[in-house]
Each structure stands twice: as C-alpha cells, then as structure tokens.
Image: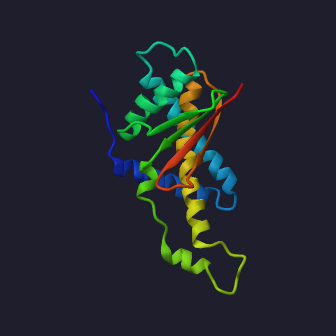
Amino acid sequence: MVREVSESCVDSLMREMIDSYSNRFYADKPDLAARRIEAIGYQVGHQLSERYTMDRLRFNDHLDAIKFICKDFWSELFKKQIDNLKTNHRGTFVLQDNKFLWLARMSIDPSSADNVNSAEDNSSPSAENIAAEAMSMHLYFPCGIIRGALSNLGIPCAVSADISNLPACSFVIRIKA
C-alpha cells in the first residue's frame, strides 16, 4: 500500500516550521534557526532513505547513490526526477530541478516589504533581499533531506542550494573525503 501526503499539507507544514523557527524560537538568531531547520530535514531524509532502500542492495559507488537520489528518491518526494545532474568527477555533484515545487508557489507579503523600504533609510534591506532571505530559509530543509539521505547511504557530504535562476533550484553536493 502506497502512502502519500497531500502537497498542501506539506506546504503548510513547511511554512509553519520555517515561520516558527525563524520568527518565534530563534527570531534573533537566524543562523541557529537555519541549522535547526536543516537538522529536521536531515532526520527526514535519513528516515526516507532507509524506507526507500529497504529492498535494495547497497550502492557500489557515489555516482550510483547520487543517481538514486536524482531518480527514485526525488520521484518519491516530488513526483518527478531531477532535471539535470552534473559532476566534476572529484566529489562535487550539482542536481538541478528546473521548477522546484517548494519554491514555485512562494511569495512574500508586499506590505512587509513596503514597510522595510523607506526612502530615507538606505541601510534597510530591499524587497529582493527580504525575498532571497525568506527563500533561503526554505532551502535548508531540502538540503537537510538530501544530506540525511546520502548519510544513510554511507556518504558524508555537505549540501548547499543555489536559487540564482528562479524557479530553478540547484543543489550542490560536496562529498567529504
């Protein structure tokens, strides 16, 4: 029996988790909030990887594990495969999702951006900076999911995200030697 969760439930859970950690629990410590969100993603990725690889043989090398993440794991999470995989064959992989589902429906409250943008205070952040910061908070969770899944497969790594070309999102995986 296949168990699925509604996309709207996942979206609501993500928004609430990020809002709680960024604006309530660690409002004055965004780095700590980011680490906590990533840690939650790590646990989720670790457990999902355990479930999805239960009936599989262990992977022979890093590339096979990354291909599993791109095809099977991503398909289970987002109902589609990663659009592009690049590697330098020295432990760095870039996974690109051309329409990353968790960012596709994001927006910021324009009234909060207007309040921040006063014409007389040049030191205040722009609406673009506020949007970029909000989106980056939403990327710590999927980075943690990828890191947790790979960790469960025996691959210690660091994962970061790049959203310079929205709605595309690239996840950079650097495998630790």
The colour scheme used to paint the residues is rainbow
Relative image position of residue 35 (x, y in whole percent): 65, 46
Q: Residue furthest left?
A: 1
Relative side of 72 to 120, left or right: left
In depth, the one of 122 and 111 nearer the eye is 122
Relative side of 1 to 60, left or right: left
Residue visible at 27% across and 26% down? 1
In depth, the one of 68 and 141 nearer the eye is 68
Residue visible at 43% across and 35% down? 74
Image position of 82 with respect to 98: above or below: above
Q: Quadrant of the C terminus?
A: top right
Residue visible at 46% across and 30% down? 48
Relative image position of residue 105 (x, y in whole percent): 41, 58
Residue visible at 58% across and 49% down? 162
Q: Residue furthest bottom?
A: 120
Relative image position of residue 175 (x, y in whole percent): 66, 29
In depth, the one of 167 and 121 nearer the eye is 167
In depth, the one of 103 and 149 nearer the eye is 103
Image position of 75 with respect to 34: above or below: above
Image position of 15 with respect to 117: above or below: above
Q: How many marks?
A: 0
